[in-house]
Amino acid sequence: PLMPQWDVSFTIATLVLGCAFSSKSIAISPHPVWAGFALGLLGGMVSLMNPVALLALVCWIGFLFLARRVPTRYWIRCFLGFAVTVALCNAPWLIRNYALWHAPVLRTNFGMTLYSSNNNCAAPNLGEDGLNGCYQQTHPIASDAEVQLLRRLGEVEYDRQRTADAFSWIRSHPSRFAQLTTARVAQFWFPLDTISDGPVYAVWLITLLSIPGMVLMFRRRELAVWFLLSVWLLYPLAYYVVVASDRYRYPILWTSLLPAGYCVMALVRRLRPSSPH
């Protein structure tokens, strides 16, 4: 679709573009600050659409610095240019929010998401939460009572209160929180979709192929393994504590496609009959 739901398609495109651009610019441009500035514009776009996805771009930049043995002075100047530009891209939104709420905040949806994901009726994934009615009771997008509370407290205070409520529930229900988190970890990598089964099983296949692909890449000492592992370890952490949804995986699905494709090509080469000399 021309205008896809949520931010996912735009986030993926900008993130991959940032990785492709940085692979050409880092250690090639004679002006590291300007290279960092250009890359920071893409990083700023990613952070505005999905702040967590910025981790993948940062991991990629760090990987390039290490893999190409970029001089320390160069990478410091480049990364400073990148960080300052990302901050400047977010500054207008931060100023707008401060003028509106008199609080230095970028987003106010963490608390409501955390609260609707961790409570007495919570299920591991968003589909089940909707089917059992928990989502409709606990999230402002579907609950009139939550909307009224949000209006009365204001977005910032509502977010703070719901964050505190969620952490209070987690402390008082450690076993249930552990069960939800374990299920969400599994469903991040092997998502369940109660609406359409086709796309999620494609993700399952990609995930299953990526595991032996990573093992093979590691045995062959492919440096990209360290980038992929860092993204897989860091990016999902924020999503392990909230309801699982297949769209959370999409911004980094391409990092699973790489080792999955590596595995497929290794199988093709093994099964292909040897050509006569």
Image: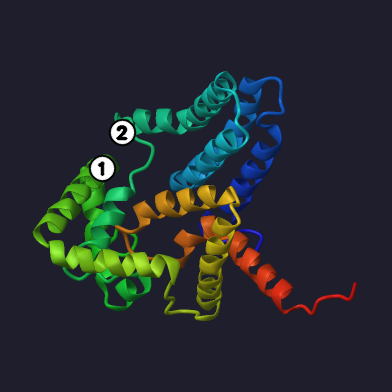
Q: Is residue 121 above or below residue 51?
A: below
Q: Is residue 135 visible?
A: no
| Mark 2 or 1, nearer chain start | 2
* Left/right of residue 160 with respect to residue 71 in the rendered view: left
Q: Position of residue 172 (x, y in %)?
A: 9, 59
Q: In the rendered image, which quarter is residue 37 located in?
A: top right
Residue at the outermost left position: 172
> Is the Cβ of the residue at disc 2 closer than 8 Å to that at disc 1?
yes
Q: Look at the picture and state if 110 lies above or below 169.
A: above
Q: Which mark is residue 154?
A: 1
Residue 2's x, y, as percent? 66, 60
Residue hosting label 2: 101
Tell me: residue 53, above or below residue 254: above
Query: Which residue sits at x=25%, y=70%?
Result: 134
Residue pictured at 16% horizontal, 57% vertical: 170
- Where residue 267 sits, quadrant-wise, is bottom right
